[in-house]
Amino acid sequence: MSPSSLSSHRRVVAVTLLVPALVALALWAFAWPAARTAPRDLPLGVAGPTAATAPVEQRLGSREGAFDLRHYADEAAAREAVEDREVYGAVVVTARGPKLLTASAASPVVAQLLQQAVTSHASAPGGRVATVDVVPAPEGDPRGAVLNTSVLPLALAGIGAGTAVTLLGLRGARAVAALAGSAALVGAVATVLAHSWLDAVPGNRWTVAGTFALAALAMGAAVAGLSALLGRAGIALGGLVIMLLGNPFSGASSAPEMLPEPAGAIGQWLPPGAGVSLLRSVSFFDGAAAAGPALTLTWWAALGLGAVLLGRAPKERAGNAEPAVEPEPAPAG
């Protein structure tokens, strides 16, 4: 068998095995978190006198590992904790029975789950629980569908920008300018659609645009930075991390605490998850709990752009490092 024929057979085998492997990886990444969605140490407040809240805490604690219960002195303190994104909701024990505070803007899925859990575990059998939505989702998008679906377009925009910069051969400051300009336009377009047209992501227009842009820049810089360090293999690695880990592990459709461990924690360290968390904070909670995800996105963007400015693919470094071969002197004659 000739070398060319052997090489062709190897390529056929590689493609035959690679495609099913990618399908299996995608199914695992997307189906596993969806199939195992359940509360895991979900922050939930309980407000009222200790003697009155003890039975409620005991009932809620019967679902071992489901809730991270935090005690507050009264309804005002519990409401403030919800608005500051310390908890997803709070059960306030009153003389008339328990009252549930929720924040559907943080997660409509979690708000509905808390209503069911508190009704079945915190109230008397057959009792009803008054519910107050402290931070409601917008009327134009009560289920949070726009914010949830924004993860995929942002991921595609970031991967596309990083890939284009690499394939077009842009280097140094030109690559950084292209990534920053692309991210700024992505932020502007996303804000026009989600904020102004659909009215699904409220908040300050410029803050929302900056959040969209920072998320896109973090993902684009990550792909371009990996490519600068690893060559074109960095495009594949960056795309896989962002699309097959960052997207399904983001918790956008529910909450990070609803995903199986450690998917929720991993997702918040990746740009898609950090982007969604930051967007929720600046859109609905006046920036509460925004520092963590903002810092995560900033680090991804800074490290990626630093790699673009300083890093070069291994083959390029090796080529530049090869010593020049001096010609042998012509024999005297």
Image: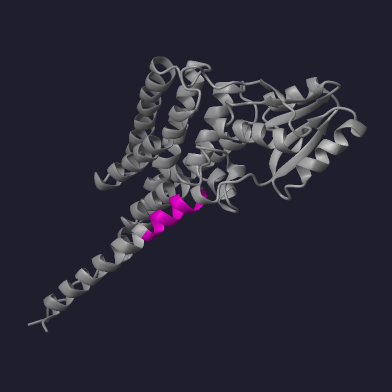
Which quadrant of the rendered structure holds the C terminus? bottom left
Given the current orientation, which residue lies at the most extreme front position?
Answer: 126
| Dominant secondary structure of the residues highlighted in magenta in the image | helix
Model colouring: one colour
Task: Examine the rendering and report whether any part of residue 312 can be seen.
Answer: no
Residue 183 magenta: no
Report x, y in % for residue 314: 35, 61
Report x, y in % for residue 219: 42, 41
Which quadrant of the rendered structure holds the N terminus? bottom left
Question: Residue 61 vs residue 141: left or right?
Answer: right
Report x, y in % for residue 133: 64, 21
Residue drawn 60% across and 32% down? Answer: 112
Given the current orientation, which residue lies at the most extreme left position?
Answer: 333
Question: Residue 91 vs residue 240: left or right?
Answer: right
- Rendered view: 27 above or below 178: below
Q: Which of 53/141 is in front?
A: 53
Residue drawn 21% across and 69% down? Answer: 11
* Label total for image: 0
Residue 295 picture quarter:
top right
Report x, y in % for residue 208: 49, 23
- Rendered view: 190 above or below 267: above
Given the current orientation, which residue lies at the most extreme right position?
Answer: 51
Q: Which of 232/260 is in front?
A: 260
Residue drawn 62% across and 43% down? Answer: 257
Residue drawn 57% across and 39% down? Answer: 255
User: What's the magenta region?
Assistant: 24-33
Q: Which of 83/302 is in front?
A: 83
Task: Examine the rendering and report whether any part of residue 306 can be seen.
Answer: yes
Q: Which of 158/102 is in front?
A: 102
